[in-house]
Image (cartoon, rainbow, N blue to C red):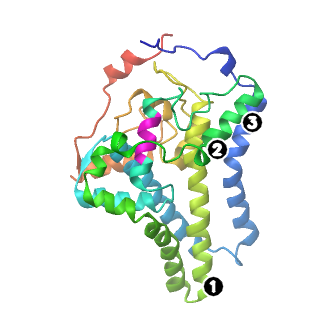
Amino acid sequence: MTAIITEIPAELHMTRGQKITNLVGVTLPFVGFVASIFLFWGSYVTWRDLIIFAVGYALTTLGISIGFHRLFTHRSYETYRAIRYGLAVLGSMAVQGPVIRWVSDHRKHHNFADREGDPHSPHAGFAPGLRGKLAGLWHAHVGWLFRNVGRAEWTKYAKDLLADRGMVFISRWFPAWVAASLVLPFVAGWIWGGTLDAGLQAMFWGGLIRIFLLHHITWSVNSVCHFVGSRRFQVKDESRNVWWLSWISFGESWHHNHHAFPSSAFHGLKPWELDIGGLVIRLLRRLGLVWKVNTPSVDMQRRRQLAG
């Protein structure tokens, strides 16, 4: 049996400069987004565009977080079929690939986390030193999309979803959900603003910019959250918690917690660990819309904590 990692190997320690580089790479798209609001306010962006953007971002991020990830990949709770299919459609509108492919790749990631076979580890197969670290981060963030995406066997990693005709239909019609993710903000802007220009402007912010930002936030969980951040549990991989990504990733960046307890519906395990996805699941449970919600007990967490 592979020994449990209790400390970070020396060759994986990062310099302050490397951490700053990662921070810039992840936050730059968001900074550009904020800057563009100030630069184009009143001409190319309005409150209408930002509201459409925010609603679209929240819905599609939840589709990925509590849908593709926590429900379909890890089966951390159960819900009604209509909600399952609704989350599958919303996750598809995040434009990160068909649901069955996404789930297959992610289950394979957990099966080989940070070892040879992991589709997007920043560590497996990369040499030590700055060049190897940067190559690994590039691979985990974007490069794997051109090498390993979609290579996990669906019949092995997503047999349960393949048995669901509705899920197969949603996965097969992925191009239609991509089109809808652009058409819906366009229609909303057109109706709200009353002009074709208003529709096109809303499609830019609520469609293209939303997709761009959500892509980089999700990819940052693959890259940054396996390289820099805190850890307190005994796990066999290099997953990390990155607090400054938690609010915009809806709790997905409590990634070390997640790798310690993959089937947990909640990634934020401390009261101060903001987990918007987890809060939504709690609300749905209170409303009776979800059940069998998996939660690691305090005793389970204590037993897995690192010594010291």
Q: Which residue is mark 3?
A: 20
In the image: residue 44, left or right of residue 240: right
Magenta stretch? 103-109
Can residue 113 be seen here? The reply is yes
Q: Position of residue 248 (x, y in %)?
A: 55, 49
Which numbered mark, 2 or 3, is in the foreground of this view?
Answer: 2
Instruction: Tell me the element at label 3.
Output: helix
Q: Which residue is mark 1?
A: 197
Residue at (48% x, 75% y) in the render = 184
The numbered disc on residue 143 is 2
* Type of amino acid under label 3: Ile
* Type of amino acid under label 2: Gly
For the residues marked 3 and 1, what is the alpha-carbon distance in whole angstroms?
39 Å
Residue at (74% x, 36% y) in the render = 20
* Type of amino acid under label 1: Asp
User: Decide: marks 2, 3 in contact (CB < 8 A)?
Assistant: no
Residue at (68% x, 40% y) in the render = 138
Does 40 appear in magenta? no
